[in-house]
Amino acid sequence: MAATTDIKQLRIATRNCGFIDPESLDDYIAVRGYEALAKALTMTPAEVVEIIKVAGLRGRGGGGFPTGVKWGIALSNAADQKYIVCNADEGDPGAFMDRAVLEGDPHSVVEAMAIGGYAIGATLGAVYIRAEYPLAIKRLRKAIDDARAMGLLGKNIFGSGFDFDIEIKYGAGAFVCGEETALIKSMEGHRGEPVSKPPFPAQSGYWAKPTIVNNVETFANVPAIIIKGADWFAGIGTATSKGTKVFALAGKIVNVGLIEVPMGTTLREVIFDIGGGCPDGKEFKAVQTGGPSGGALANKDLDVAIDYESLIARKSMMGSGGMVVMDEDDCMVSVAKFFLDFTMDETCGKCTPCRIGSKRLYEILDKITKGHGTKADLARLKSLSDSIKDTALCGLGQTMPNPILSTMDTFGHEYEAHVTQKKCPAHVCTAMLTYTINPAKCTGCTLCTKVCPVECISGTKKQPHVIDASKCIKCGACYDKCKFDSIIKM
C-alpha cells in the first residue's frame, strides 16, 4: 500500500494492509480475523442488520446509501435464493483503493461477505472484479480457498448450520459496470447496461433474486464494526457520514498515494497536512473529487468538512474516493474536457441523453478550447448539462456533467476569457497560444532555432531572434529550451 504520512489518519478499512501477510490465513486470524463472523453467527440476522444500521455505515462506492437499510430490504424480501455481491470493478482514473484492500487484506472482504450473507439470508456470494487486477485476483482466490479449507466458507460454518460460499466473476473494465444494475447484467452474461429502478437489486437483482451489491471498502469496514460495536463506529465522523474514507491522492501533490481519514476531515488537512501541498511551490488551484463524474473544488472550499452532503452541496460528490489535485498551471476548461472525454468513451450508449449528450458537450468544449467558442456556447453548455442530469438513465449519466457545471460555477472567468478574449489564462490551450521573443533578453545563442521543428525562428548569431507566427505550430520546444527566459508564452 502506498502510504503517505500518518498525520490525521485513522485506518479502519485498511487496518491490516501492510501489517499482515495477505496470503496467510494464520496472519489474519492473529489480528482477530473471522472473530466477527463467529460473533455474528451467535446473533439473529435482524440483529446483525441493526448493528450495521446503528453504526451508520454508508456505501463507499459512490452512492452513499445506508448499508444497513439496504441489507434490511433484502432480509425482508423472502426468496428461495439470495445473493451478496462485492463490487470490485474499480474504474476511476488514478483510484486504486479497492485494489489495495484486496491485495493487502483479502480475508477481511471474504469475512464481511459471509457476515452479509448471513444477515440477509444468502448462501452464495460473488466478487465482480476487473480482470486487469491479477495480483488482487490471485490473493482473493487464495483467501477463498484457504477459508473454505478451514471451514470458514462452505457448509455449516462454525457449526451454526449456516452455509455460504463465494465465486469470482471477471469484468472487462467497463466503467459503467461500477453501477450495480449494469454490474448484475454483466454477471449474467449480458452486455453491461443499467436498468431502470425500481425494483432495486435488494428486491430483484442477480437472476431476479434479492441481491446486495456493496463495494470492497464498504465490506472491509464490516468486521471491525461487528467486533468493536456500532457505537464505536458511529462515534467517528460527522452527524450524517460515519467512520472513515479511503482516498487516492493523485495529480499535482507532493505525497501521492492512499490515505484513510475520518469523515469530516477538511480538504485543507488532506491536501496540505497529509498531501504536502503542490510540488515546486506552485499554488493550489482545485481538486477533483468523486472521479471523472465528480466536481472541482477550489480554494474557497478548502475548509469544508468532507462528507457526502457537503460535497454534493458544492456540485461534487464523494464517489469512490479519487482526488486529483491541480495547480496554477492547469486550465479548468481543459480539465472539464479531459474528464468528459473519459465519460464519453465509457458511456454504455443505452440512453440518448448520455450517448448523444456527452458527444455534443465534448464538441462545445473542443470548440471553446480551440478559440472558436462564443458566449452562446457557454449558455448551451450549461443548458445541455442540466438536461442530461435530469434525463439520463443511471447515476453515471446523471453525474457526467458535474466537472463542467462545477468548473463553470467556480472558474466561470476562465470560460469567459476563452470565448470573449480568445485567451487561455493558464496558457494551456495550444490553439490560443502565441510565442514571441523579448529582444531585450535574447542573446542570439541560437538554441531555439536548433530545436524548432518547423524552422520558424530566424536571426543572426549573438543578435535577437524573431518567431514567424504564421509558421509557428506552438509546440513550445523553444520555450522549454531557452536559458534566458526570452521566449514569451501568451
Image: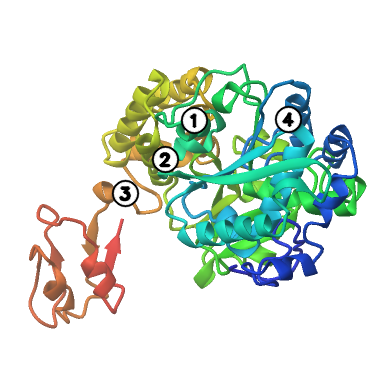
Inspect the image, locate mark 3, and give the three-letter code of the amino acid beneath it: Cys
The percent coordinates of residue 241 (x first, y second) are: 78, 41
Above-or-below relation of 310 to 469: above
Q: Are marks 3 and 2 in contact (CB under 8 Å)?
A: no
Name the mark on residue 174. 2
Alpha carbon separation for disc pair 3 and 1: 36 Å
Left/right of residue 422 with respect to residue 3 in the rendered view: left
Q: Quadrant of residue 485?
A: bottom left
Q: Residues within 10 Å of mark 2 (few under 14, many from 20)?
A: many
Left/right of residue 391 with respect to residue 152 in the rendered view: left
The percent coordinates of residue 424 (x first, y second) are: 36, 47
Name the mark on residue 182. 1
The percent coordinates of residue 184 (x first, y second) are: 52, 31
**Label 2 residue SS:** loop
Nearest-to-viewer mark from 4 and 3: 4
- Residue beneath disc 3: 429
Q: Work out which quarter of the rendered image holds the C terminus and state it.
A: bottom left
Left/right of residue 213 with respect to residue 163 in the rendered view: left
Inspect the image, locate mark 1, and give the three-letter code of the amino acid beneath it: Ala
**Label 4 residue SS:** helix
